[in-house]
Image (cartoon, rainbow, N blue to C red):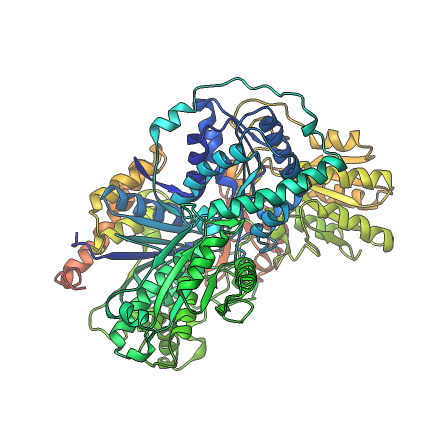
Amino acid sequence: MRTLQSRFDILLAGVGGQGVVLASRVLAAAALKAGLATKTSETMGMAQREGSVTSHVRIGTQVYSPLISQGQANLLVSLEPAEAVRNLAFLHHSGWLLVNTEAVIPVTVSAGLSKYNDDKIKAYLAAYVGKDTKEERLLLIDGSKLAREAGSEKTLNSVMLGAVCGIGLLPMTQGVVLETLLHMVPPRTAEMNKKAFNLGYEEINLRLADRGGQCINTN
Amino acid sequence: MKRLIMGNEAIALGAVEAGVEVVTAYPGTPSSEIVGTLAKMAPEYGFYVEWSTNEKVALEVAAGASYAGARSLVAMKQVGLNVASDALMSLAYIGVKGGLVLVVADDPGPHSSQTEQDTRVFGKFAKIPVFNPTTPQEAKEMVIAAFTLSEAEGMPVLVRPTTRVCHGCASVTIDEEKLKKNGVKKEYRFERDPKWIIFPRLSYERHQWLVAQEKKLAHDFSASPFNEVISLAWGHQDSACRRGHLEKLGLITSGVAHCYAMEALERLIPAEEASREGTALRNYAVLKIGTTHPLPADLILDFAADVDRILVVEEQDPYLEEAVRNLLQLAGRSNKVLGKETGDLPYAGEYSPDLLFKTIYRLSTSGAAWELSALSGQKRVTETAASLGKAETAEIPVRPPVFCAGCPHRASFYLFKEAAKGRDAVFTGDIGCYTLGNAPPLSALDTCLCMGAGVTIALGLAKVEPNRPHVGFVGDSTFFHSCLTGLVNAVYNQTKITLVVLDNSTTAMTGHQPHPGLGISATGAEAPAIDIATVCTALGVKYVRQVSPFDFEDFKKTALEAMEFPGPAVVVAKAPCVAVSKSRRKYYIDQGFCRNCGLCLGKIGCPAIARSKRGTEQGGTAKPSIGHTCRGCGLCTLVCPCGAIKEVETG
């Protein structure tokens, strides 16, 4: 847990059906539980049907806009690689990028109307975030695999929430986030979501510990 | 107590705190969760909630309850008000007894609507008060104030939130004591009075009354807590400004655009201070207007006296801009008013903090060239692309919304298209999930206008090109909303069309609300179910068949029959929405049999099928494979020429 900056902006991105809205609600509710003011803005309605979705989560003492400005997000969490690229302009130049590596190939690509080059997308993300710092603020994680390990693809959002906590940047503890998550998922899936959350948390926490914790202590 | 809730939930709680007795609505993004929330609360608090057949019905039911003295709330999206407008225009003249609050959610962007129409204009057209919230908390307070005002003035009051208020969460203060009081029930009684009967002579009198009310409220609203002057003058700049060295830019703001403007100013002012370009510095003052009709004239004139130029910040129509310009001109003021009509801000699309930052920055400086860190996001994207040397490096796929895997609409459209092959049939669409039938590769829809037009556009086409098949596609909730009159028209005027009612047993696009065909009420209680096929037969349609689109052969045969029938024909394509039903069936592609022809990818547009690494892991080489979202509808087995798609055996 870090000392509170005046503001912490998180942009969550993904594909309709991946649970982006729930993940953003968990972060915002956890922030409120930790005594922090918060605002969100979500994609609902038509775009939810397998379309690109984003949720803006803003945590801080005084937040005017429900939308994050370009270049201001402290953290961009994407449940899908291409959706990370789509929303890069929101990321602050010293912000962190957490991306689930499993692609969701849109129907437009299958029908030959659009292209999806997985490797190029990942190379681009690395080039973008690693551009002018030594410190690597791009975290690629096979969250979908961890979700399957936890028991269901549907727990991907919980894996990513755990991973977010593993970075150690949030102005609230992972305990509060996990508690909030378990309160918001259907009770019969609580155990599975807890497992997913912990798998995500461990994955990132271990990876950052291997780097000597440098990432956790720098801004 | 503070809770993190969505704007729509805040509106709902405001209504309960205000003692609402009757709640009516037809679902529509972004308004649906208002009544969704109230439907869940109704059994505990004892007020009445219904999903009405359409918005006109909803408003009239609410008005009836109000005539007897009950507080009623009616919610809809902006295009819903078009349907309800007949009732609204007259209700404004007749007036109300119990407070009647009409919440109409606008959708700048638009995210999920046919138009970006501005409901504030509708409020002015109907001459009724309009409140325009900037945040979920304010939306809740406005609903409470709207009930009080409505009852005090005997007028319906319009509250107009927008998508970013409706679908944003924030911590909102909730008054538990007031909520509990809603449980205390009162008796209501309609008192006979000629004032409830609209007649031309009464209309003339009431028109005069409405105009007088507008003048009175314009005066009252100058003291409304929802209108606020925020001065952003500080330190030396302020004194310099008073001495006339600096220009003071005034912003008049409304709705969530106010929040974007404040965010932009918060970032802009330190940047300016840091710039040391003293001559370029400005002072700012903001007038937030929450009561957009009638306008608080005195307040606006006072504000204008204290600033130089005025930038009007509002999404959608230049509603305030025109009004402010008019007001200042009448008062003989010389402030220059900037906004959409001066080309400083766009008419169409959603606003953002970035747009406001750029606009205010441009207006506040004369070409000062300090680095704008805040605008670096987009710049960085461009730079990265440039450094990697190839424009296509950052190419990302377009990802529009599509039918879910296993959606029965996909099967209905695919099979109807197959049946209509070689006939040059025109498929007319309607408003709902099935509008997505227009997207490639299905490309099954030729028109989409508004609710109900799936039937009636086909009727018009059929009269002028009688030798071509015309097939209208509408949903089950849509059928009840506005297709009945069109269908009666088809029977009466003997028009040969095929109407396909895509009955997935829910109002899917807006979040799965019940409707008259389902046998359950808004609160989940048992209700009479109105059978669509029976209704069509009763209306005189001679060919009515109900068939599941997953009975592929039967459905295709029915489609052919219906198109050949010499009069109006109805096919009820009945299969539940995948989001409200369960399926254990799944299919897989046997990579040994697959010849990689790609027909499964190119013909039906199922998001569960893709060429991905998953296929490689399953032993194939970039052949199509089926992912975990498969629901086992089996439509893909129809298009596979190799018999490679097989059902997963489940124990």
Q: Position of residue B568 (x, y in %)?
A: 82, 41
- Left or right relative to B394: residue B58: right
Q: Position of residue B629 (x, y in %)?
A: 47, 47
Above or below residue A41? Residue B251 is: below
Answer whether residue A69 is visible to the viewer in this image: no
**In which quadrant is the N terminus of chain B drawn?**
top left
Closer to us: B209 or A80: B209
Res. B302 image quadrant: bottom left
Task: Specify the farthest residue to the left.
Answer: A212
Res. A189 image quadrant: top left
Above or below residue A126? Residue A143 is: above
**In which quadrant is the C terminus of chain B drawn?**
top left
Number of labels in the image equals: 0
Q: Residue at x 49, y 29 (%)?
A: B20
Q: Residue at x 56, y 66 (%)?
A: A112
Q: Residue at x 48, y 68 (%)?
A: B335
Above or below residue B383? Residue A113 is: above
